[in-house]
């Protein structure tokens, strides 16, 4: 009796599955036959009252019916889903040849654009590109650059100290020493990267900004070579004539040292908050490498001379694109980022 019931249910369910036209209807059939209170489930519950022999025979059959039915249901769902999609597509009249709608494209950050352009310019002049860590040891960031502990020059570059004693580097000059340890002169190198300082923020000062270090070491070099390289960089990047001024500047790792300022391109030199109303922007400190620094890098200052410079890349980007406040560069404002 149970056996007949089971087989009859099987053929009934199969017929209905074949006829079903939607996933929802197939799901209803699943619940009706295989659900917790479904017809097949009920039969399986009745097995407990049968003899051992009958239990064996019917139990096996019931499980086979159940598995077969599950497979049929799953297959039917696949077929019906496919049909539903095809019907929908046919109704929607979707034209796959229709041209797409244009999305606004992203762009490189202005500082990245300037950094990449500077790299190209320096590569063209035979400079190698070096890198260094943003978390730096006190030794490379200060000591090897002729700035021992307790030197007053440390006050000009207060930074963030880690509990390990390391610092967030204040200047890409830290790359000079690392480079000299690896490469023998003569050489020309640049090292662009992020720097950090603990200082009050204003229109031209951020606590995180970009510099580009440059260093050239050869047997015969002079300040004239240095000025030529600086002028080439500025005219190529800014693509216009700019007025520059060279004045003495103190950095313990160069002697003599200079500050190369450019006429503020935001106000044309008449004075604005970005140039602190002076008409000039401090952009490019530089100088002839101090003999102590060459010596610390294993280079004989009697044999070789060097010059070094540290371009304020973030400020250079501000000048190029007419950005009046350094903080705008980190604001995510598309009017600034799309420049
Ligand atoms: C230095 O950092 C030296 N290492 C540069 C140098 C290299 C001198 C090699 C001699 C030889 P200074 O502290 O002036 O120098 O910083 C260099 C440039 O980085 C500045 O002219 C400025 O353009 C930029 N700069 C410095 N501090 C900030 C800041 N807080 N926000 C944005 N730009 C900054």
Image (cartoon, helix red, strand yellow):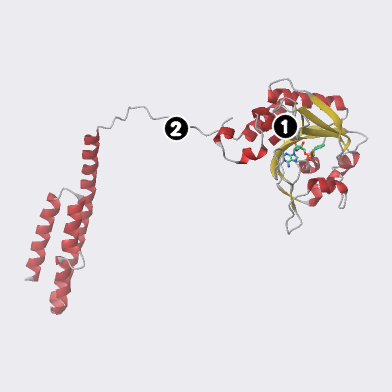
Looking at the rendering, which quadrant does residue 308 occupy?
A: top right
Which of pointers 1 and 2 indicates the residue nearer the eye?
1
Residue appearing at x 20%, y 64% in the figure: 35
Looking at the rendering, which quadrant does residue 224 occupy?
A: top right
Left/right placement of residue 13 relative to residue 230 reads left
Residue 68, can we see it? no
- Residue holding disc 1: 272
Q: How many badges with numbers are in the image?
A: 2
- Residue holding disc 2: 103
Alpha carbon separation for disc pair 1 and 2: 37 Å
Looking at the rendering, which quadrant does residue 285 occupy?
A: top right
**Residue 274 place in picture, x, y as percent:** 71, 34
SS of the residue under disc 1: loop
Vertical side of 133 occupied by 2: above or below: below
Residue appearing at x 73%, y 56% in the figure: 162
Residue appearing at x 87%, y 27% in the figure: 223
Q: Residues within 10 Å of mark 1 (few under 14, many from 20)?
A: some
User: Where is the N terminus found, in terms of image quarters?
Assistant: bottom left
**Residue 152 place in picture, x, y as percent:** 87, 48
SS of the residue under disc 2: loop
Residue appearing at x 73%, y 33% in the figure: 128
Vertical side of 100 occupied by 38: above or below: below
**Residue 136 place in picture, x, y as percent:** 74, 49
Left/right placement of residue 66 relative to residue 192 reads left
Vertical side of 123 occupied by 30: above or below: below
The circle on residue 323 is none
Residue 6, can we see it? yes
């Amino acid at each position: 009796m149970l056996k007949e019931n089971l087989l009859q249910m099987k053929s009934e369910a199969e017929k209905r599955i074949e006829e079903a036209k939607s996933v929802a209807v197939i799901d209803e059939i699943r619940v009706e036959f295989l659900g917790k209170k479904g017809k097949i489930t009920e039969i399986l519950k009745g097995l407990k009252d049968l003899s051992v022999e009958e239990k064996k025979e019917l139990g096996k059959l019931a499980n086979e019916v159940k598995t077969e039915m599950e497979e049929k249901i799953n297959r039917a769902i696949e077929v019906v889903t496919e049909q539903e999609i095809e019907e929908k597509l046919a109704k929607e009249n979707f034209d796959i040849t229709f041209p797409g709608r244009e999305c606004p494209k992203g762009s490189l950050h202005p500082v990245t654009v300037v950094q990449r352009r500077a790299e190209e310019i320096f590569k063209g002049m035979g400079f190698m590109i070096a890198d260094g860590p943003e978390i730096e040891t006190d030794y490379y960031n200060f000591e090897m650059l002729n700035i021992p502990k307790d030197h007053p020059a440390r006050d000009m570059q207060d930074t963030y100290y880690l509990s390990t004693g390391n610092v967030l580097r204040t200047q890409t000059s830290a790359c000079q020493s690392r480079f000299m340890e690896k490469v023998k002169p003569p050489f020309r190198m640049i090292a662009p990267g992020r720097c950090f300082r603990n200082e009050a923020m204003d229109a031209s000062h951020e606590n995180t900004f970009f510099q580009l270090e440059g260093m050239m070491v050869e047997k015969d070099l002079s300040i004239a070579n240095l000025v030529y390289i600086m002028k080439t960089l500025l005219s190529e990047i800014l693509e216009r004539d700019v007025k520059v001024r060279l004045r003495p500047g103190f950095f313990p790792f160069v002697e003599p040292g200079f500050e190369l300022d450019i006429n503020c391109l935001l106000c044309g030199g008449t004075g604005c908050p970005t140039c602190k109303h002076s008409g000039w922007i401090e952009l490019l400190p530089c100088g002839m490498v101090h003999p102590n620094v060459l010596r610390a890098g294993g280079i004989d200052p009697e044999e070789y001379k060097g010059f070094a410079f540290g371009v304020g890349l973030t400020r250079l980007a501000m000048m190029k694109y007419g950005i009046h406040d350094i903080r705008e560069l980190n604001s995510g404002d598309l009017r600034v980022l799309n420049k």
